[in-house]
Amino acid sequence: MRLEKEGMMRRLVMVAGMIVLLIAGGVFAAQGSAKDAAGCDGLGVYRSEMFAAASAYAQRMTDDGLHDRTIVSLSSDDWQHFAENALAYQRDLKAITPPAWAASWHLTQVAYAGIAQQMSTLAAENGLLAVTAVSPQLDQVAVDAAAAAQTTTRTCADFAAFVSDWYRFLGIDDPAATPTS
């Protein structure tokens, strides 16, 4: 029972990270280089587009009063706004065409946004504890993201720095650096 509670708390913290996205993400987006390194064609543009999408998401969350809120303080209406924002974020991510070498990792980010939308909808309709229904999906997308990042970094070594910046911007642990149980 204790392990289940710890696992749920870890997942809730991961989701809470999406709520508390840093607005100052433009700093990370600006780090894209003018000329991409060998094997990293398109990384600079991709980086800018991804951070623009995450910044827009953060702004929507702030506009709805969801920034810097604990998940236990969210009402059903708040969770519904969260779901709407996660859906818009997923659509923004889907509109981005990643470099071919980053496509598998990009799909994990689209999937994560979709799971956040599902989780938020469940919480709006059934309360906070309903989020446990998506816990296996969150765990799997973290595993998939870590594997995709590792594979992608073999093609583009600079991708590792992008991924690190990405997860730091989102305020969540890097799945490649965080063991899952």
Image (cartoon, rainbow, N blue to C red):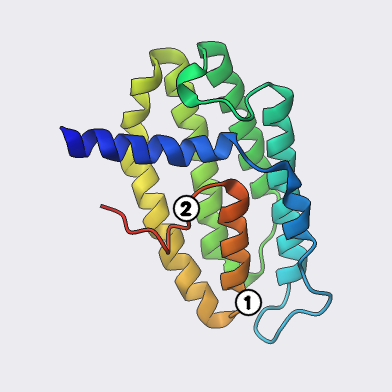
Where residue 90 sits, quadrant-wise, is top right
Q: Percent x, y for residue 159?
A: 60, 72
Q: Residues within 10 Å of mark 2 (few under 14, many from 20)?
A: some
Where residue 8 sits, quadrant-wise, is top left
Picture residue at 22% right of the left edge, 36% below the top: 4
Mark nearer the viewer, 1 or 2: 2
Picture residue at 81% right of the left edge, 80% below the top: 35
Q: In the drawing, what numbered circle is on residue 120?
A: none
Sooner in the amino-acid sequence: mark 1 or mark 2: 1
Closest to the observer, 177 or 47 = 177
**Furthest residue in direction left, as rendered:** 1
In-image side of 26 versus 78 (left or right): right
Instruction: Give the distance between the C-alpha atoms of the residues marked 1 and 2, in whole angstroms.
Output: 19 Å
Quarter of the image containing the N terminus? top left
In-image side of 140 versus 30 (left or right): left
Secondary element type, mark 2: loop
Q: Percent x, y for residue 15?
A: 48, 37
Q: In the drawing, what numbered circle is on residue 173?
A: 2
**Label 2 amino acid?**
Asp
Q: In the rendered view, would you say 75 is above or below 43? A: above
Where residue 77 sits, quadrant-wise, is top right
**Label 1 amino acid?**
Asp
Q: In the drawing, what numbered circle is on residue 158?
A: 1
In-image side of 141 versus 8 (left or right): right
**Furthest residue in direction right, as rendered:** 34
Picture residue at 72% right of the left edge, 59% below the top: 28
Q: In the rendered view, would you say 134 is above or below 100? A: above
